[in-house]
Image (cartoon, grey):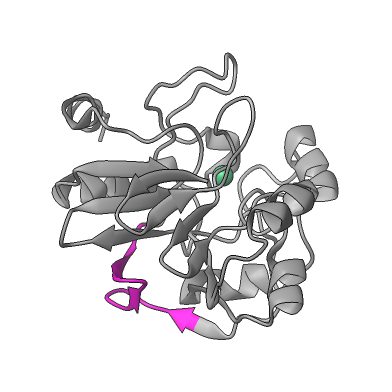
Amino acid sequence: MKYLAPGVWRLKELPAPSINVYLAEDVLIDAGRRWDRRRIFAELEGVEISLLALTHAHPDHQGVAKDLCEARGVPLACHADDVEAMEGKRPMQEAAPGNPVNTMIRKIWQGPPYKVDRVLTEGDEVAGFRVVLAPGHARGEVIFFRESDRVAICGDVIRNMSYATGLPGIREPPPIFTYDPAENRRSIRKLADLEPSLILPGHGPAVTDIAAFERFAAALPA
Ligand SMILES: [Zn+2]
């Protein structure tokens, strides 16, 4: 695991971090794709966890949720607005459902539905982080924000990689995975308003150049 901030780690992924799973104290944040099972289970061997909390219930963040919660006997948490998606009561990916990329992702990445034990709402606390609702990419997307050192685990509100080249770069999530890009831009501004010192995105390495992030957020269209 890679150390990122006090009590915060990212599970290893080679050759570069692209589908991120974080450990904050004893809470696992996100659960990769279905096929990340071996990697996640191997890295968590001997590591105590008490909860799996999702930034949002998309197939590349909830893939191993059911397997992990069952195997480790831990509860599952996600925001109230993503409970139905996680429990299989509405489609997980609402943007462009007929797009062949989304059809493929649903078939090969998405994990089975699973019961949400702990329903999160704005202001709740998880592993010392405050839950901040940030919809647009997913209805129940949240940022986990730690006031004391201003670390933000931001899910897919932004990403720090190009899906074309795999190289780092701050970007909006792609429209085909984002049901309301304008709403997500409001969530990016909400992230900027938190004045984070370190941003840990769902995809790509940590964002340490906060000035670059602020320029990116300020240049977004309304
Ligand atoms: Zn994602």
Magenta region includes residue 148: no
Q: Which residues are magenta?
A: 119-134
Q: Is residue 172 left or right of residue 70?
A: left
**Residue in the picture at 56% in, 72% down:** 48
Q: Residue furthest top?
A: 165
The quadrant where ligand 1 appears is top right
Position of residue 71 measured from the top left corner of the image (x, y, whole percent)? 76, 75
Q: Is residue 74 above or below residue 17?
A: below
Q: Is residue 7 above or below residue 21?
A: below
Magenta region includes residue 133: yes
Position of residue 14 measured from the top left corner of the image (x, y, whole percent)? 64, 30
Front one among 51 and 172 = 51
Q: Is residue 24 left or right of residue 59?
A: left
Q: Is residue 183 above or below residue 218?
A: below
Q: Quadrant of the C terminus?
A: top left
**Residue in the picture at 51% in, 21% down:** 162
Q: Quadrant of residue 200?
A: top left
Position of residue 201 measured from the top left corner of the image (x, y, whole percent)? 42, 42
**Residue in the picture at 32% in, 78% down:** 124
Q: Is residue 196 above or below residue 13?
A: below
